[in-house]
Image: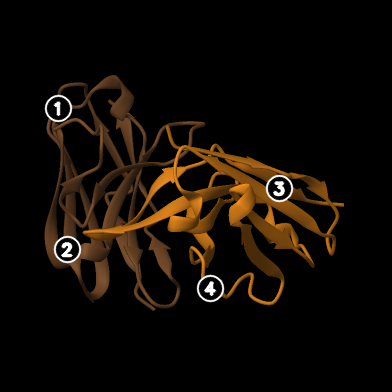
């Protein structure tokens, strides 16, 4: 079973700053299998990035994804108030079919 | 507009059963594979189960295998999760989510979730 690790656990930043979130897999994976979601407090998760670097429909271009192999990154170029939330990376696999990382919380500094 | 609306959550005693439903609209339901994902209070996301679009292929997380059954009725645009032998650790918000295999493998739309509380 592939394990996903996200770092940091919490990121404290100010609006307008750049956020860099990391997702590391315990073994090399296809970038097609890696996605990112944002979950605002009390809300449902929303797809941000799929296949490591493709923005989902309606997602602003301040969000970008990159990476390959075991290391993947979600970058938010300029934090907006609605971006202070939880972020999860997700891996599609064989067993289990989906694995989620533990999440990174982006807090207002 | 794609919509997924879960229902059927509630309070149930340990060992009890519950059936969740997810009503889909705004897309051709039978063309899409579907999943259930849950989130325990204050915790992260955990995939629960998957069902194919029309071939009834199903997969389960080890934590629910043998206790939960996923099903769908394409004529009614509905997804279900039958949960038996419920345990305290099954307490969570349960989301249905649409599974997409276009370029990548991901969940592109999620419902608002329904809360299941297992407690005596």
Closer-to-camera residue (B109/B89): B109
Image position of B100 with respect to B64: above or below: above
C-alpha gap between disc 3 and disc 1: 37 Å
- Residue sitting at the far front: B75
User: Mark 1 highlights which residue?
Assistant: A78
In the image shown, does B41 or B19 lie closer to the viewer?
Answer: B19
Q: Quadrant of residue A95?
A: bottom left
Left or right of residue A49: residue B1: right
Say whether residue B44 is visible: no
Separation of marks 1 and 2 at Cα, in angstroms: 22 Å
Marks 4 and 3 share the same chain: yes
Q: Are marks 1 and 2 in contact (CB under 8 Å)?
A: no
Spot occupied by residue A56 in the image (x, y as percentages of width and height):
25, 42
Q: Which chain contains the residue that carries disc 3?
A: B
Q: Nearer the viewer, mark 3 or mark 1?
A: 3
Q: Residue at x 27, y 49 (%)?
A: A8
- The subunit carrying tag 4 is B
The quarter of the image holding the N terminus of chain A is bottom left
Find out whether the residues at labels 3 and 1 contact each other: C-beta distance under 8 Å.
no
Q: What is the C-alpha distance between the residues marked 2 and 3?
A: 35 Å
Which residue is disc 2 drawn over?
A: A71
For the residues labelled 1 and 4, say whether their Cβ atoms are less than 8 Å apart. no
Disc 3, SS = strand
Between the C-alphas of marks 4 and 3, the distance is 21 Å
Dot 2 and dot 3 residues touching (CB under 8 Å): no
- Left or right of residue A76, residue A99 in this image: right
Same-subunit check for callouts 2 and 3 = no
Q: Which mark is residue A56?
A: none
Q: Secondary structure at mark 2?
A: strand
What residue is pinned by disc 3? B116
Between disc 2 and disc 4, the foreground one is 4
Residue tagged by mark 4?
B59
């Amino acid at each position: 079973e592939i394990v996903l690790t996200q770092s940091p656990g919490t990121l404290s930043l100010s609006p307008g700053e750049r956020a860099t979130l990391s997702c590391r897999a315990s073994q090399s994976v296809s970038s097609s299998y890696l996605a990112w979601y944002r979950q605002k407090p009390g809300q449902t998760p929303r797809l941000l990035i799929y296949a490591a670097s493709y923005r989902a429909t309606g997602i602003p271009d301040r969000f970008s994804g990159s990476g390959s192999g075991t290391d993947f990154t979600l970058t938010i170029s300029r934090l907006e108030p609605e971006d202070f939330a939880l972020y999860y990376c997700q891996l599609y696999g064989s067993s289990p079919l989906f694995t989620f990382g533990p999440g990174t919380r982006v807090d207002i500094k | 507009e794609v919509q997924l609306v879960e229902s059927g959550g509630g309070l149930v005693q340990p060992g009890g059963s519950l059936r969740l439903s997810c009503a889909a609209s705004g897309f051709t339901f039978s063309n899409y594979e579907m999943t259930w994902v849950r989130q325990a209070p204050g915790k992260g996301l955990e995939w629960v189960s998957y069902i194919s679009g029309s071939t009834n292929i199903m997969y389960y997380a080890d934590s629910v295998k043998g206790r939960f059954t996923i099903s769908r009725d394409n004529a009614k645009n509905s997804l279900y999760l039958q949960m038996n032998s419920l345990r305290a650790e099954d307490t969570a918000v349960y989301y249905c989510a649409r599974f997409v295999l276009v370029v990548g493998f991901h969940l592109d739309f999620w419902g608002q979730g329904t809360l299941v509380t297992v407690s005596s």
